[in-house]
Image (cartoon, coloured by chain):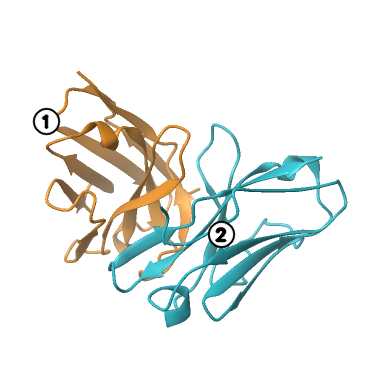
Chain colours: A cyan, B orange
């Protein structure tokens, strides 16, 4: 059972918009710790997609955006493309555990 | 360019030990906190351990506390994970990752991973 909760799967057609939710608690997201998002393509290491709730590292398309409110966060992907098919993970810091915590991951399928 | 190369994985019997290494290059290693993250086969990501830029502070997931030790040698630009009393549930791909800033727990660069299999 992951500390952060994500839907196991989402799907969308090319060109559509999808969102992935990430629900935490008052000891992590709700305690104002930043949320980060990672994309993991099959057989590869994760890649930082969004940091600090809504910031994109250099090279990440602006089709990807993040938001945070209360004890939850969301990743939005617009203009869905076939190459976006991957696993997505949210991550934060938990003050009760004194360490990093991940969501269980969401598999995005592009129909 | 920033590069992290993980090594040291392999097949080990339950109860035995293994030491993983992560060789860093292309950035000021001694300026960044570093982390270990693992992923069991077919499962999600799990944060394992963190070490501050100078090695003075170390943090562990409850699942490995007392068994794993994270360390670093800034003169060799290398991060280590000493794993003792290994269990079947420790079987996973282990990744080292760089902390983007001063301990904000955003991992901006990752190694390619090294596979640890605990089995008799």
- Residue B38 location (% of width, % of height): 37, 43
What residue appears at the point 56 percent right and 73 percent down from the top-left corner? Answer: A72
Give the class, few, some or many, for how many residues have Cα within 10 Å of label 2's Cα (few <14, many ≥20). Answer: many
Residue A71, position as x, y percentages in the image: 51, 76
Residue hosting label 2? A37
Q: Are marks 2 and 1 in contact (CB under 8 Å)?
A: no
**Nearer to us in this view, A44 or A109:** A109
Residue under circle 1? B15
Nearest to the observer: residue A24 or residue B101: A24
Question: Can residue A109 be seen by looking at this rendering?
Answer: yes
Q: Can residue A32 be seen in this view?
A: no
Q: Can you tell which of label 2 and label 1 is closer to the viewer?
A: 1
Q: Which chain carries label 1?
A: B
The total of numbered circles placed on residues is 2
Can you tell which quarter of the image residue A7 is in? bottom right
Position of A42 with respect to B38 (left or right) is right
Relative to residue B79, is residue A20 drawn left or right? right
Alpha carbon distance from label 2 to label 1: 35 Å
| Above or below for B55 versus B1 | below
Q: In this view, does B33 lie to the left or right of A82?
A: left
Residue sitting at the far front: A1
Where is residue B50 shown, x and y percent of the image?
Answer: 28, 58
CA neighbours of label 1 inside 10 A, class few (<14), some (14 to 19), many (20+): some
Task: Kindly identify the residue that appears in the image at 29 percent across and 72 percent down.
Answer: A96
Q: In this view, does A12 lie above or below A21?
A: above
Q: In which quadrant of the rendered view does residue A86 lie? A: top right
Checking the image for residue B94, the label placed there is none
> Percent x, y for residue B41?
43, 32
């Amino acid at each position: 059972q992951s500390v952060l909760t994500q839907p196991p799967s989402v799907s969308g057609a090319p060109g559509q918009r999808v969102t992935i939710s990430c629900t935490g608690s008052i000891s992590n997201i709700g305690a104002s710790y930043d949320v980060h998002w990672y994309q993991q393509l099959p057989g590869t290491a994760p890649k930082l997609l969004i940091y600090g709730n809504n910031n994109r590292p250099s090279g990440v398309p602006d089709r990807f955006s993040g938001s945070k409110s209360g004890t939850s966060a969301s990743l939005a992907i617009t203009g869905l493309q076939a190459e976006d098919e991957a696993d997505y993970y949210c991550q934060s810091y938990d003050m009760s555990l004194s360490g990093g915590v991940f969501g269980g991951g969401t598999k995005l399928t592009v129909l | 360019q920033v590069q992290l190369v993980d090594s040291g994985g392999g097949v080990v019997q339950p109860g035995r030990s293994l030491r993983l290494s992560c060789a860093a290059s292309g950035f000021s290693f001694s300026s960044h906190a570093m982390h270990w993250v693992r992923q069991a086969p077919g499962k999600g990501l799990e944060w394992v351990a963190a070490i501050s830029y100078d090695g003075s502070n170390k943090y562990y997931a409850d699942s490995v506390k007392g068994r794993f030790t994270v360390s670093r040698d800034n003169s060799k630009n290398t991060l280590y994970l000493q794993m003792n009393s290994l269990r079947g549930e420790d079987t996973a791909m282990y990744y080292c990752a760089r902390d983007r800033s001063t301990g904000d727990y955003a991992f901006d660069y990752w190694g390619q991973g090294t596979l640890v299999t605990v089995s008799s």
